[in-house]
Image: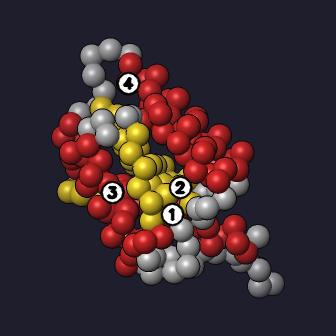
């Protein structure tokens, strides 16, 4: 079999710039996601001064901030961090859906990787598990995916 030419992203963040868009709603969870993302990026060579944190009210507002950041050309990737926890009304479904659709649209429109670190959980316990306990830290996962996509896109 012939050797395939493979494009893969190296997980080296040196020389790159990142914007973190983080929800103030459920900040006790989101702060853990921020910590995980920043730790991951700096461990992989990012200069802490090359990471900008933008706080927005909630997950519904994230796409607008992410769009403005992506359009600025100042960032190699935008990483969105939040927590939408299901309640007794359909509000959860609308917020989670519109946030995900909006962030996907930003990524496609501006060709800037958007890391999706917005938890969508049925309970507070599930959110805690995904913000640094049993299920890992989804802020780390979002930062890793964004970094890998930056490096992949630079090779394409």
Counting residues from the start of the chain, the first of labels 3 and 1 encountered is: 1
Seen at 30% across and 32% down, the residue is 85
Say which of 57 and 144 sits in front: 57
Counting residues from the start of the chain, the first of labels 2 and 1 encountered is: 1
Q: Is 88 located above or below residue 15 in the figure?
A: above
Residue named by callout 3: 34
Gap between marks 2 and 1, in whole Å? Answer: 6 Å
For label 4, the crowd category at 10 Å Cα-Cα, with few meaning under 14, some 14 to 19 and many 20 or more, is some
Residue 120, visible in the rendered structure: no
Residue named by callout 1: 18
Q: Is 4 located above or below residue 102 in the figure?
A: below
Residue named by callout 4: 92
Disc number placed over residue 7 in the picture, else none: none
- Circles 4 and 1: CB distance less than 8 Å? no
Residue 50, visible in the rendered structure: yes
**Tag 4's secondary structure?**
helix
Gap between marks 3 and 1, in whole Å? Answer: 12 Å
């Amino acid at each position: 079999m012939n050797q395939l030419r493979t494009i893969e992203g190296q997980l080296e963040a040196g020389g790159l710039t990142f914007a973190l868009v983080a929800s103030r709603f459920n900040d006790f969870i989101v702060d853990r996601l921020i910590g995980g993302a920043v730790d991951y990026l700096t461990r992989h060579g990012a200069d802490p001064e090359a990471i900008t944190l933008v706080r927005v009210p909630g997950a519904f507002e994230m796409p607008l901030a992410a769009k403005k950041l992506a359009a600025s050309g100042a960032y190699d990737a935008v990483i969105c961090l939040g927590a939408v926890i299901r309640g007794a009304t359909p509000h959860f479904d609308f917020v989670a859906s519109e946030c995900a659709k909006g962030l996907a649209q930003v990524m496609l429109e501006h060709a800037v990787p958007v890391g999706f670190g917005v938890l969508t959980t049925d309970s507070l316990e599930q959110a805690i598990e995904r913000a640094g306990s049993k299920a890992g830290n989804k802020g780390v996962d979002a930062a890793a995916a964004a970094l890998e996509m930056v490096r992949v896109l630079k090779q394409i």
